[in-house]
Amino acid sequence: MNSIDSVTLEVADTTAAARFYSTAFGLDSSHVRLRACEVPTTGFRGFTLSLVVSQPGNVDALVGAALDAGATALKPTSKSLWGYGGVVQAPDGTIWKIATSTKKDTGPVTRDFDELVLLLGVEDVKASKQFYVEQGLTVGKSFGGKYVEFATGSGPVKLALYKRRALAKDAGVPADGTGSHRLVLSSVASPFSDPDGFVWEATAPLAATT
């Protein structure tokens, strides 16, 4: 395994979720797949998805489109030491961060994004890092027991690990949560679950998903 082939969000209403992601972010099943699910989940689900963009104006455009489409603001857009960004929660409960490392606009504002990043909130970053290395992933960046980013090549989604409580704080929500992550990852590897209960499946044809 050297990449994520796809990310599937488990949602109560796939039609409504597909409409939201298309309207708000211009995403389709080539970016994020959807699957109907009623498994109980409460509080923080232990992950966030991030859209990394090129300039602040694009952050504002995407956050604004998400709010207009029914998302809830968790953190208003603002400047920080690292750049500019904001956090919203989609109607299906998934938390999205829209961010850029640039502090000034340098071109026309669009709703284009450069990267889609999945951050898994884990209890032990070093242990989870070793687990994924043993599955075949290569570490791209590592900051001790705080943050790890994998070199997932040309795959559509980048994968990173962050301390669960730190990730919840970054998202603007309490770290407590129970039940399903409502997230399934796919790769060429055999099915497995990681130390924090995130489920991986063997990659299925796109036509087999909603």
Image (cartoon, grey):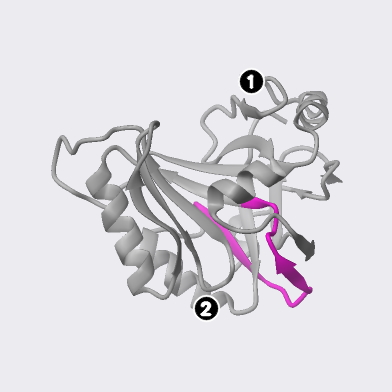
On the picture, is 194 further left or further right than 93? right
Residue 44 forms part of the magenta stretch: yes
Give, as a single range, the part of the protein colored magenta.
Answer: 31-47
Q: Nearer the viewer, residue 11 or 146?
A: 146
On the picture, is 56 further left or further right than 205? left
**Residue at 58% from the left image edge and 62% from the top image edge:** 94
The residue identified by callout 2 is 15
Q: Nearer the viewer, residue 124 or 40?
A: 124
Asked which secondary structure carries label 2, the reply is helix
Crowd tier of the residue under label 1, counting other residues whose Cα lies within 10 Å: few below 14, some 14–19, many 20 or above: some
Where the C terminus falls, by quadrant? bottom right
What percent of the width, then of the height, locates residue 39? 78, 73
What percent of the width, then of the height, locates residue 54? 29, 37
| Residue 140 seen in the current view | no
User: The disc labelled 1 sits on which kind of residue?
Assistant: Ser
User: The disc labelled 2 sits on which kind of residue?
Assistant: Thr
| Residue 92 seen in the current view | yes
Asked which secondary structure carries label 1, the reply is strand
State the mark number for residue 142.
Answer: 1
Q: Is residue 158 above or below residue 76?
A: above
Could you tell me how many numbered marks the image carries?
A: 2
- Which label sits in the foreground, 1 or 2? 1
Q: Mark 1 or mark 2: which comes first in sequence?
A: 2
On the picture, is 20 further left or further right than 172? left
Q: Quadrant of residue 174?
A: bottom right
What percent of the width, then of the height, locates residue 203? 70, 48
